[in-house]
Image (cartoon, coloured by chain):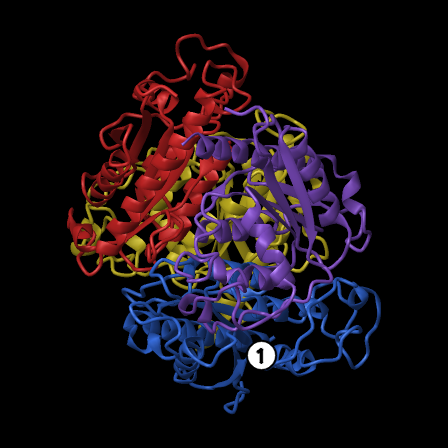
Chain colours: A yellow, B red, C purple, D blue
Amino acid sequence: MSKTADPVRILGIVGSPRKGNTDLLVREALKSAEAVGNVETELMPIAGLKIHPCVACFRCFDEKTGTRACPSFEDDMEKVYPKLARSDGIIIASPVYFGGITGQLKTLLDRTEPFVRYARTGYGGGLSNKVGGAIAVGYNRNGGQETSIQMIHSYFLVHDMIVVGSGPAETPGCYYGGGAVTHPKRSKVLDAVAGDELGIRSAKGLGEKVARVALMIKKSNREK
Amino acid sequence: MSKTADPVRILGIVGSPRKGNTDLLVREALKSAEAVGNVETELMPIAGLKIHPCVACFRCFDEKTGTRACPSFEDDMEKVYPKLARSDGIIIASPVYFGGITGQLKTLLDRTEPFVRYARTGYGGGLSNKVGGAIAVGYNRNGGQETSIQMIHSYFLVHDMIVVGSGPAETPGCYYGGGAVTHPKRSKVLDAVAGDELGIRSAKGLGEKVARVALMIKKSNREK
Amino acid sequence: MSKTADPVRILGIVGSPRKGNTDLLVREALKSAEAVGNVETELMPIAGLKIHPCVACFRCFDEKTGTRACPSFEDDMEKVYPKLARSDGIIIASPVYFGGITGQLKTLLDRTEPFVRYARTGYGGGLSNKVGGAIAVGYNRNGGQETSIQMIHSYFLVHDMIVVGSGPAETPGCYYGGGAVTHPKRSKVLDAVAGDELGIRSAKGLGEKVARVALMIKKSNREK
Amino acid sequence: MSKTADPVRILGIVGSPRKGNTDLLVREALKSAEAVGNVETELMPIAGLKIHPCVACFRCFDEKTGTRACPSFEDDMEKVYPKLARSDGIIIASPVYFGGITGQLKTLLDRTEPFVRYARTGYGGGLSNKVGGAIAVGYNRNGGQETSIQMIHSYFLVHDMIVVGSGPAETPGCYYGGGAVTHPKRSKVLDAVAGDELGIRSAKGLGEKVARVALMIKKSNREK
């Protein structure tokens, strides 16, 4: 095996319209992923991206779309698609809005239709076997973090991805992924989560876990 | 008890960007609700509505917003808020996108922040005790209908609503709500679900159930 | 309407093999339910009950079982069935075992098969329109409380029950039901949850909510 | 790398009290796993096993238990523990009972407490990085298959396992795992699921996926 193995690439998607708590958690997760070694990370905040919602035209199922993934809309998803395609692991994080992920994040995820298994775009099936992990941060303690993480896991499984939780720490706070709380600070405080040691620990655990499993998958594929 | 009791009002939200299968299911649910008697229904497709995503400014928590619910954006939500406020029951329906509801629908739901319990708008706590039911339609048979319904139930519970399923039919197909399938027709076929008897049955059961429980809740409150 | 209206009855099922934290939370929920007025409560710990697991014989679907609900096993479920049947609201609580409710509790719930809608026992459909609420207590902060509550909600909906969360408190800690944490005390400490103010608050909120909605449903039915 | 590499071992747990539909689906999944090559499988029906429910004594957290995993009960779990320990992939299957897995299966899973990360038994942390997949079979079409699979996934993640769905087939029927239906045959028909092509396809897809990912993980670990 080569000593100069390709690094694994972990993409961290920050599904918040603000630059605050979710961003902070994903940064911690990515730092923790890098510390594993041979890992490159990229932070992708969705705030500011212009993304048209999917209109279920299904043209990406039927048309060879050539250089563009989505035949219907030419927008910031053109920058997102290659990032997803080249990643080995994907961390998706969201503030909890009504027990789930943000509309903005769901809108972005919906536009990954060109990656579905029966898409005729060059991206069809392209997320298969990538490693996925989820992070959610809420105002209330048990305020929908778990149900938000579940929603992201559902997304991963529809793309035939591999799902991991927050790793083997003794008391991770949240097993399913990164689970954090802004309370007692108000949600509008952009770094409220900085005081949530447990939440940060679970996000770090998740980042490391995604990296470790992505390394295993990549190594195995290289050896074929 | 008065013979000319106020009817209960059931709002049916069609969370699809298209006018097709989801629309058809909500229409069936609403017809079934009306058949209970003393029920008025309103169909609200979200297709075509212009709704800015919530940016988590939290101004609706802090400011008395007077005649407008959302201090930040003036858009089609202004039409949605009063519909929600005057309803006794709310049916939320979505096509399944990646195991969950559409980004467009989640975006609309996120903008109901002025109804949260601690909002200082006139709408604060305004969905409390309304009766909620969910419908989901997917391409695959067990393709995320249940997880989409769960997501809608989470939304209801965050608003302190009352959640019901598809009623007491012997074999409802789906207990948790309306659960329908477009397969073997392709999802792009706008009336693919017309052939899904079981799915339509569960949507009808849901409509009736929402109506019956909303009538109970309303009657009880009238008697106080 | 009579001044001496029948009280509503709330049954609190403690799904723990021990007499400890879950018990404490259900007691708080029931006290809070009683404080609403015109509410009678009963605590039912499952510890010590001898209950044979359901073996899916389906005899309760096919046979008129007369005075006994389950044709196959005569055990402590004979005491449980009438408690369930006469309740107007049911609170089900569990410690979190591996992200879900205890095997003991699931075993009891499985044996409510004689209440399913197509059972030919006298209990068939008998939980329809009863009001259900869930409580879960875990060691980790986001340690499966929400997923355990979801599991209980699924149970309620299969029985055509009406599901409520933890009520309208400003910061309930958990919206979906009672959500409590034993950490930093160890789970083996039987009153570890006594220090979890937030968890107790959510359990109290749940008890009150179940009572209030059960009163509405009962009152409405009495007026028919 | 050795040409005669160790095979991966996939354990298929049949969580039904009967020998019927669930058994049939797990057999299909395991056959499909074997067809991948270099895979050994073992079917483990839980019917007939004598397993005492976990009583949350937490002795396995505190005591070095030597040759026995559970210090409190000596029963058929003694046969289950080594099977779990030596597996590389674990498929857990259940009939849907009230939207979830059977009490019998949950009881068995609860007794894997000696594998939790902080257990001082020889098995502590022992399921970490094993690959998990879930199968559920219900009577109704959308009758709790997805919520049952979720429950099993929660279990996997608490054990720091790696979760996969039903693989990359174009129309798997169920993405999250094997999802099958006995209807229109009655659930008591032991081979009702034999006619459910879609359900069998998803179970097969799951078996193959668990095998492929388990092979990747094992190969990678061997290369260290």
How far across and how far down the image is residue A69, in percent? 25, 49
Closest to the observer: B13 or A149? Answer: B13
How far across and how far down the image is residue B213, in percent? 40, 36
Q: Amino acid at mark 1?
A: Ser
Considering only vertical position in the picture, is A90 above or below B65? below
Considering only vertical position in the picture, is D72 above or below C37? below
Q: As drawn, which residue projects farthest toward the right?
A: D63
Host chain of mark 1: D
Considering only vertical position in the picture, is C144 above or below A101? below
How far across and how far down the image is residue A60, in percent? 21, 51
Residue sitting at x 29%, y 29%: B39
Query: Dot 1: within a 10 Å radius of its alpha carbon, few (fewer than 14), some, or many (20 or more) residues?
Result: many
Is C59 on the left-hand or right-hand side of A146? Answer: left
Is C200 on the left-hand or right-hand side of C4? Answer: right
Which residue in the protein does label 1 denote? D87
How far across and how far down the image is residue B164, in percent? 42, 42
Note whether residue B54 is visible: no
Residue sitting at x 29%, y 68%: D184
Closest to the observer: D32 or B152? Answer: B152
Note whether residue B147 is visible: yes
Q: As drawn, which residue projects farthest toward the bottom?
A: D4
Residue sitting at x 34%, y 76%: D192
In the picture, the quarter occupied by the C terminus of chain D is bottom right
Closest to the observer: C48 or D83? Answer: C48
Considering only vertical position in the picture, is C87 above or below D174? above
Residue sitting at x 84%, y 69%: D63
Quarter-of-image position of residue A62: bottom left
